[in-house]
Image (spheres, rainbow, N blue to C red):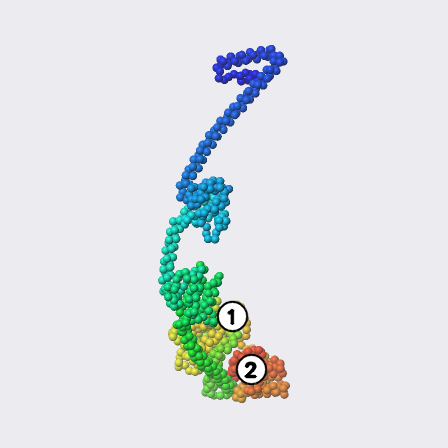
Amino acid sequence: MDADLALSLVDPADSLARQNEKLLTIAGALIRHAEEMTEDRGTGFAQFQRAAMLEEQVRERTRDLERALDLLNASNARLADANRETATTRQNLAAAVETLHEGFALFDSNEILVMCNTRFNALLPDIRDQLMPGLHFLDYLRTVARSRHLGLAEGMTPETWIEMRQLRHEQHHFILTQRMGEDRWVQVSEHRTQDGGTVILQTEVTDLIRAERRERGRMLDDQAAVLRATLEHLNLGVCIFDARLHLLGWNGKMADFLTLPRNRLRAGMHFDTLLEQVRNQFIFPNGLSAYRLADWVRRARRRDHFQMEVRHEGGQIYEIFAQELPDGGFVISLADVTAERSALAALERANETLEARVAERTLELEDALERAERANASRSRFVAAASHDLLQPLSAAKLYLTSLGDDAISPTARGTLEKAQNALLSVEGILGALLDISRLESGRVAVDMAPVALGPMFRALADEFAPIAALKGIDLAIRPTEAVVISDRAYLRRILQNLISNAIRYTESGRVAVLTRRRGTMLRVEVRDSGTGIAEEDQELIFREFHRLNAHASASEGMGLGLAIVERAAAVLGHPLGLRSALGCGSTFSVGLQPVAGPVPRPEGPAPVEMRGAETRDLLVLLVENDAALAGAMVQLLEKWGVTVLDVASGEEALELIDATGVEPDVCLIDFQLGDGIDGLDCLSGLRARLGDVPARIVTADRSEALQRRATAMGAQIMAKPIPPSELATVLFGRQRRG
């Protein structure tokens, strides 16, 4: 410790010899001090030691302060350099901003003005000196609003201008055009900086505004010239008023219509002044006056246009039309409609004459239509009545011929008998076709659209036409099918019967095929033949009544009604009918049908009558028939078959017979048309009331839908005249029986 103290008292700047000398002196003094030390002198030495230590500490702190001062001087030097650079940058920025052609101002994130150039608000010289750094944005707006050079829009006050600028300022970015000074304009744009500050740029656009104004003025002048030329070209009289009801413009036609000298019309004339000059020239309708137009003009909102016809004192008719313009003004047009109204009056007179003539012709046409309908109805009734009257003796003739079947007659007579039967069959077919045509043309056909299984129908058609095709040596192939379609069973069978019969008739050799084919969602039944084919020009004619391609064909081969019936029935059922044919290539007729899923079992023909008692004993048949010839033929045939017949001529007699005898017939054969008394269905109803559900058939030549509906409602079955003996045998015995 003493050594350290001694070293600390040596001046490093001394020479080494001087330092050694001082050290030796100090060491000798210390030795003497140690040897001669007393208590007082020890205390002084301790104070000396403490002073030496404090001096060392002061020297250390002095060195620390010197180092800190060096660091501070270096930092101050760098700060001075930075301040100089900042000042230089600020001067450069201010110089750069001053070089801008736009006014520039920068506000910091606290809305305080940082700087602006001399062009900023240069067009507001009375506030220019107040724009200093440190100015708040709101104070800036208030200062600008007080400037007498600030141009405010119409209806805007300094306060509303400040509110507008504050609202736009909140958008962070906007551009607007502001008038400053006398006819001077600047475009003001505000942009928000990344640190939340605001930059305002002001670009003077006075020259652009003035150029645009001049261009708009030229355009308006051009448009005004075009408008004037257009107005002068119109046949209408036109005048235009502004929102203050002052006249802006007009054309010469308006002056002519108003019979005013052109110098009486002048720009700026008030509407009331013009109205007073001309209101006495016009007569308004229904007691109205010119003030009706004045009331419309003075409305606060003219939402609807004004339109009225007036008569001029010279006799002309004018149409006044007035409509509001977007700027609050309005336009009035005056159109001379005298010629149109005269023409309209003449047209109305002509229409009245024409309507009278049309009404007269309509009555004539109605009378003609009524006569035609009466004639058509009369024809239909005549066809039905004539067919019924013909079917009665025809049925009797067939029954008589059948009753002769087993008699001992010569071969020549048998051949004649067969020819007579064939002739009767031809007559029966013709009469049936006539009845079908009459019923289809009447438009009162009722159809029962229901699922129909084609398989059983095809088998029945094969049984029916196979013998006929075999007689001609033609191969008839009807392909089996399990398809079920939507149709009317009776009419669909009649369509296919006629198509197959027609194919066999016009095929001399080869094949006739009936098959089904899928076409999309439809099922098509096709009847193909290998006949001579049909020329394209004849393919529409064959569907006409009584039209046959083979004009030399006999009546026994048909009267040309089969395809006519097919076409009408297919139309009623809604089944598309098709034909493909060419000469020498045969023909294919097709009927489009709508298929359904799954088979629908349904009996194809009338169910046989269920017999009461054993078949081995004689049957008792009640025959109700008012036609004596037909009744005689039926009795003769039935008695030949071993059937006991009770025949009466009316329904009343049949009921009286049952009441008197109490007999219960096995089968009842009842004619529908029984004269003036009750008809066949009423007779059957009476018999059922007495006998219960007795097996019966209604025998009739009436094929009307009304009768069919009545019979269906009663659960009665119909046997059509002429009566086929085979069907009669099936009804009585459940099977066909040879005559």
Quadrant in which the N terminus is drawn: top right
Observer-nearest of 642 and 372: 372
- What SS does tag 2 mark? strand
Q: Where in the figure is residue 362, as x and y percent of width and height? A: 45, 79
| Residue 308 found in image quarter | bottom left
How far apart marks 1 and 2 lie (CA) works out to 30 Å
Above or below, comparing residue 157 to residue 350 in the picture: above
Observer-nearest of 728 and 312: 312
Which residue is at a point 52% across and 23% down the rendered structure image? 62
Q: Name which residue type carries label 1.
A: Val
Horizontal arrangement in the rendering, residue 407 relative to residue 582 (left or right): right
Please say whether residue 195 is visible from this viewpoint: no
Which residue is at a point 38% across and 74% down the rendered structure image? 536
Q: Residues within 10 Å of mark 1 (few under 14, many from 20)?
A: many
Observer-nearest of 231 and 393: 231
Q: Where in the figure is residue 69, as x and y percent of width and height? A: 50, 27
* Mark 1 / mark 2, whichever is N-terminal: 1
| Residue 254 found in image quarter | bottom left
Pointer 1 and pointer 2: residues touching (CB < 8 Å)?
Answer: no
Q: Which numbered disc covers residue 698?
A: 2
Q: Where in the figure is residue 113, as x and y percent of width and height? A: 48, 41
- What SS does tag 1 mark? strand
Q: Where in the figure is residue 306, as x and y percent of width and height? A: 46, 66
Horizontal arrangement in the rendering, residue 155 relative to residue 223 (left or right): right
Q: Name which residue type carries label 2.
A: Ile
Which residue is at a point 41% across and 39% down the rendered structure image? 95
Above or below, comparing residue 429 to residue 340 in the picture: below
Q: Which numbered disc covers residue 649?
A: none
Please say whether residue 555 is visible from this viewpoint: yes
Above or below, comparing residue 581 to residue 430 in the picture: above
Q: Residues within 10 Å of mark 2 (few under 14, many from 20)?
A: many
Q: Mark 1 — residue?
A: 484
